[in-house]
């Protein structure tokens, strides 16, 4: 059996008729840029999330850059973000000549350690960018309190958590990406809501920021050929919007299927003492963009090699914390500040997870893992 990390094709086959029809409709209309489907998808996603504005763009990295551009920051202003994540967040910060300030993460949820945020704040700090890693929210209630206390903006990176719910201590809840000032997401094909190419979006309830973001994505312009601010050209193309429109009504079902798969993994892996299963926060649902465990007392590469021989893909998200990346070696970061992210990069392992997992696949994976542990 071959088990890839994701199976986008299987997901496509289920919706093939509708997706093919909707792609053909765009081609027949030849309305490829900012077509009706883009506007409709923005409205539909805004309704699903219960947020006032969804502004689509070219990809999740652009979304982060555009969100930061909307905040009128000055060179060397500081942006606090997680040390254990995909590079895009820190990259967008550095690209705009702002200074990324990394904060270590919790060992159990892999999300930013909110108890360490205040110590990282300086007079130059302007923004906190929590990343909702692997499909569950960072502790947004505490982050919003800190932001309020120090008058900081919050940009949520929700690229891995579209559809996830955050539960407040008063019993109310909001969708990930609707709590901070702005949020950014990615529709990269393997994301929980993915298109068939690149795509991204920015969400905000703030109308002033929304107006500015709408200009930034469109060359800093409200009226064609009249440019008020420096912007970019970053658009979700109409074909991708049509695909996302078709998939959005199924997002909750896909996320549920991922949770069912995660439960299967939990049951099987909690019996193996070398595997520490991921923790689910009290304040967040988990939509398992990744199913990532920690390994102890075992050679990670040997396990990966063993599973590969059985056709099972695994991946390491992420093999190097961001403060250690070559690109950030010109900035002095104290390695001792990042004990957890350093440790995680050496012991995490992600297993295949997507909306089309079934018991047969899950049994094959978990039996193979058990088989490995009985042999060592
Ligand atoms: C947490 C996070 N932020 C940002 C991005 C960037 O998204 P994109 O690949 O669409 O630029 C990703 C994508 O992998 C991501 O996982």
Image (cartoon, grey):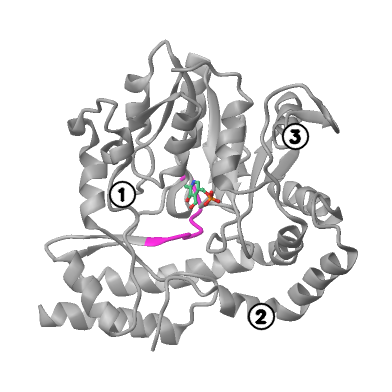
250 in magenta: no
Residue extending furthest front? 225
Which quadrant would residue 201 be assigned to in this image? Answer: top right
User: Which residue sits at x=28%, y=39%?
Assistant: 326
User: Which residue sits at x=29%, y=26%?
Assistant: 331
Residue annotated with mark 2:
14
Q: Quadrant of the C terminus?
A: bottom left
Tell me the distance, in whole angstroms, between the alpha carbons under discs 1 and 2.
Answer: 35 Å
Residue 3's spot in the image, x, y percent?
40, 80
Q: Which label sits on residue 214?
A: 3
Q: Quadrant of the N terminus?
A: bottom left
The span picked out in magenta is 283-291
Q: Are marks 1 and 2 in contact (CB under 8 Å)?
A: no
Task: Assign a secondary structure to mark 3.
Answer: helix
Task: Assign a secondary structure to mark 1.
Answer: loop
Which quadrant would residue 139 be assigned to in this image? Answer: top left
Q: Is residue 171 visible?
A: no
Q: Which label sits on residue 59?
A: none
**Mark 1 / mark 3, whichever is N-terminal:** 1
């Amino acid at each position: 059996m071959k088990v890839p990390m994701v199976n986008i094709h299987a997901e496509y086959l289920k919706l093939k008729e509708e997706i093919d029809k909707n792609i053909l409709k765009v081609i027949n209309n030849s309305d490829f840029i900012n077509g009706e489907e883009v506007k409709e998808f923005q409205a539909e996603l805004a309704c699903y999330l219960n947020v006032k504005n969804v502004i689509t763009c070219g990809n999740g990295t652009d979304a982060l850059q555009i969100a930061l551009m909307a905040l009128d920051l000055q060179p060397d202003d500081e942006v606090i973000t997680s040390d254990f994540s995909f590079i895009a967040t820190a990259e967008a910060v550095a690209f705009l000549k702002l200074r990324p300030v990394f904060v270590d993460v919790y060992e159990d949820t892999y999300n930013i350690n909110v108890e360490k945020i205040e110590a990282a704040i300086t007079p130059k700090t302007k923004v906190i960018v929590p990343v909702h890693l692997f499909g569950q929210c960072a502790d947004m209630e505490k982050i919003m309190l800190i932001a309020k206390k120090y008058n900081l903006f919050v940009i949520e990176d929700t690229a891995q958590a579209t559809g996830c719910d955050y539960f407040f201590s008063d019993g109310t809840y909001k969708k990930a990406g609707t709590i901070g000032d702005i949020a950014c997401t990615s529709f990269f094909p393997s994301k929980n809501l993915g298109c068939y190419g690149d795509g991204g979006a920015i969400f905000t309830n703030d109308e002033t920021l929304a107006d500015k973001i709408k200009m930034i994505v469109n060359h800093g312009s409200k009226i064609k050929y009249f440019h008020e601010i420096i912007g970019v050209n970053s658009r979700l193309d109409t074909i991708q919007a049509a695909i996302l429109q078709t998939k959005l009504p199924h997002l909750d079902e896909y996320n549920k299927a991922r949770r069912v798969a995660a439960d299967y993994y939990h049951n099987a892996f909690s019996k193996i003492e070398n595997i520490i299963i991921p923790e689910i926060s009290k304040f967040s649902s988990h939509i398992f963009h990744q199913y990532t465990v920690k390994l102890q007392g075992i050679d990670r590469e040997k396990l990966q090699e063993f599973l590969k021989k059985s056709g099972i893909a695994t991946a390491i998200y992420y093999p190097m914390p961001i403060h250690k990346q070559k690109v950030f070696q010109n900035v002095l970061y104290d390695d001792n500040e990042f004990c957890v992210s350093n440790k995680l990069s050496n012991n995490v392992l992600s297993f295949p997870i997507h909306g089309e997992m079934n018991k047969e696949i899950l049994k094959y994976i978990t039996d193979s893992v058990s088989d490995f542990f009985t042999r060592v």
